[in-house]
Image (cartoon, grey):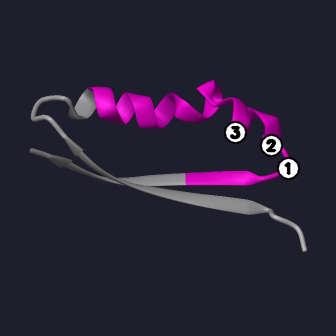
Amino acid sequence: MRITRIRVHYRLKIPAGTRDRAQRALDTHQVKCPAAMSVKGSIDIETSADIEEI
């Protein structure tokens, strides 16, 4: 058995008017995450998110 892909789905409730900041964080978190960087090239990491402004 071998792990080849990890799928992460976030359900975020964020303050109104902060969607751009939340999206930037989601777009860049893999390159800033030591765990994700350690498996880069051997395990695909897919992220998606439902973002609700409250």
Q: Is residue 9 left or right of residue 35?
A: left
46 up-or-down from 3: above or below: above
Q: Please check the rendered image and state whether residue 27 is part of the magenta-colored stretch, yes or no.
A: yes
The residue singled out by tag 1 in the image is 42
Q: Give the quadrant of the N terminus.
A: bottom right
Label 3 or label 1, whichever lies nearer to me, is 3
Residue 5 lies in quadrant: bottom right
The amino acid marked with disc number 2 is: Val
10 up-or-down from 21: above or below: below
The amino acid marked with disc number 1 is: Ser
Task: Tell me which label, 3 or 1, sits earlier in the chain.
Answer: 3
The residue singled out by tag 3 in the image is 36
| Position of residue 11 measured from the top left corner of the image (x, y, whole percent) | 32, 55
Label 2 to label 1, Cα distance in Å?
6 Å
| Position of residue 42 measured from the top left corner of the image (x, y, whole percent) | 85, 49
The residue at the point 88 percent across, 68 percent down is 2
* Range shown magenta: 21-46
Q: Is residue 50 left or right of residue 45?
A: left
| Position of residue 35 measured from the top left corner of the image (x, y, whole percent) | 71, 37
The foreground one among 27 and 39 is 39
Judged from the image, the secondary structure of the residue bearing numbered disc 2 is helix
The residue singled out by tag 2 in the image is 39
Q: Are marks 2 and 1 in contact (CB under 8 Å)?
A: yes
Q: Main secondary structure of the magenta part?
A: helix
